[in-house]
Image (cartoon, grey):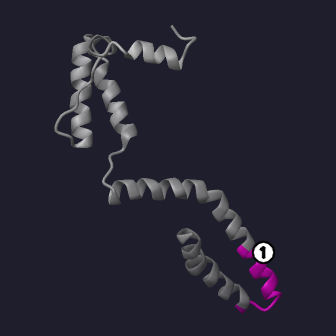
């Protein structure tokens, strides 16, 4: 809505004024030009919406770009061969990224030992998977 308002005020209206100043069929020129501009805005809108969302996430909400962080994490995990090292790295990255004091990754095997009810609960929810 805001993008359409800005587009109307700063692009369409000035162009319409310029075209109305021409002598030959000014209203027809205005209609064709504004229709073409609105069609261009509609075609560009998905890209504009993503750009505005990314900017709002970065500037207003101070969210990191998770795609870049995921790529960096993938590069760092390539040399890791031990599951414990992988979990430690993941915990560290979660703490850094989210700004939390503690993050813990619990392997499924450990969770299963601690809480023996996970498997029966999963079987009740998904009877065909075993």
> In which quadrant of the rendered view does residue 11 lie?
bottom right
Q: Which residue appears at 74% of the width and 89% of the height?
A: 22
Judging by the rendered image, the residue that carries numbered circle 1 is 32
Q: Which residue appears at 26% of the width and 34% of the height?
A: 94
Q: Which residue appears at 77% of the width and 78% of the height?
A: 31
User: Position of 118 compared to 9: left or right?
Assistant: left
User: Position of 83 compared to 4: left or right?
Assistant: left
Residue furthest toward the top? 130
Q: Position of residue 10 (x, y in %)?
A: 55, 79
Which residue is more in the foreground, 4 or 90? 90
> In which quadrant of the rendered view does residue 67 lie?
top left
At numbered mark 1, what does the secondary structure look like: helix, strand or loop? Answer: helix
Magenta region, residue range: 21-34
Indicate whether residue 118 is drawn in magenta: no
Q: Which residue appears at 31% of the width and 11% of the height?
A: 109
Q: Position of residue 88 (x, y in %)?
A: 21, 22
Q: Position of residue 126 (x, y in %)?
A: 54, 17
Q: Quadrant of the N terminus?
A: bottom right
Q: Position of residue 103 (x, y in %)?
A: 22, 31
């Amino acid at each position: 809505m805001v993008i359409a308002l800005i587009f109307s005020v700063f692009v369409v209206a000035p162009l319409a004024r310029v075209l109305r100043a021409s002598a030959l069929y000014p209203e027809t020129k205005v209609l064709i030009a504004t229709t073409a501009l609105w069609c261009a805005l509609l075609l560009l809108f998905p890209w504009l919406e993503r750009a505005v969302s990314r900017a709002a996430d970065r500037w207003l909400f101070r969210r990191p770009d998770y795609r870049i962080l995921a790529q960096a994490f993938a590069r760092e995990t390539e040399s890791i061969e031990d599951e414990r090292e992988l979990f430690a790295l993941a915990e560290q990255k979660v703490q850094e990224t989210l700004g939390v004091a503690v993050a813990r990754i619990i392997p499924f095997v450990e969770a299963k030992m601690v809480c023996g009810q996970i498997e029966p609960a999963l079987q009740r929810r998904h009877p065909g998977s075993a």
